Amino acid sequence: MFSYRTICMGFILLYYFSHLAEAVQARSDREQQVSSSLATSSRADSSNVYRIWGPKVLCSLLPDDFLECNKPIDHKDNRTAKEEKGYGCLKFGGLNYEDVEHTKVHCTVFPDIDCHGPRTFQRDGVPCIRYSEHYFLTTLLYSLLLGFLGMDRFCLGQTGTAVGKLLTLGGVGVWWIVDIILLITNRLTPEDDSNWNPYV
């Protein structure tokens, strides 16, 4: 009824399918082990994974009101020190954005603030600006009213030129007028390179 050839083909197919079934079973077992180990590790690391839609914000994205940041380091035109450190300011001050140098500072999140990630980090893009007790309006009034006595330059900390201006009575009025123009055009600035204090 069945030929020898048909019986041999049947045994060959039976042998082939049995080995195929074993290979498929072994592969599914391996995949199940890998997926279970990944699930275990993801459960263990779930506290370290940042969820963008979660309630916590990244600590590095918090506004300055929630951080305590160090002041920019002053390298005082020492380019080598800045290159070794990797951050810091060579100069302070500047009126326009492109004139102001920017650097990194170390920031720490306040203890009561809950956020995700490291609580101490470096924030980039901090302007190299510092304020002292120099007010533009006060200095301008001194320059207009008592500039011939050098009061404006005394206020800015430029003692040497202030004494010269005082002894010459404002360069017989010429130096007085020139300093008013320099002050208005922001070419006469505080001696310590600080910016005008914005709070009057």
Image: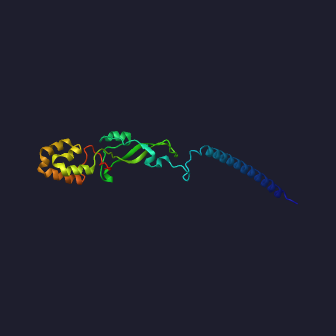
Across and down, in percent, residue 87 comes to 38, 43
Tally of marks:
0
Across and down, in percent, residue 128 comes to 34, 46
**How was the colour assigned to the protein in this rendering?**
rainbow
Q: Residue at x 20, y 50 (%)?
A: 143
Q: Left or right? Give the position of 63 relative to 129.
A: right
Q: Quadrant of residue 78?
A: top left
**Toward the viewer: 132 or 28?**
132
Across and down, in percent, residue 187 comes to 23, 51
In the current view of this chain or complex, which residue is farthest to the bottom?
A: 1
Q: Residue at x 16, y 42 (%)?
A: 163
Q: Residue at x 19, y 46 (%)?
A: 151
Across and down, in percent, residue 104 comes to 39, 45
**Toward the viewer: 89 or 181?**
181
- In the rendered image, which quarter contains the N terminus? bottom right
Q: Residue at x 67, y 46 (%)?
A: 36
Q: Left or right? Give the position of 3 relative to 145.
A: right
**Toward the viewer: 92 or 195?**
195
Q: Left or right? Give the position of 149 relative to 4.
A: left
Q: Quadrant of residue 130?
A: top left
**Toward the viewer: 183 or 123?**
183
In the depicted structure, whether residue 99 falls above or below residue 107: below
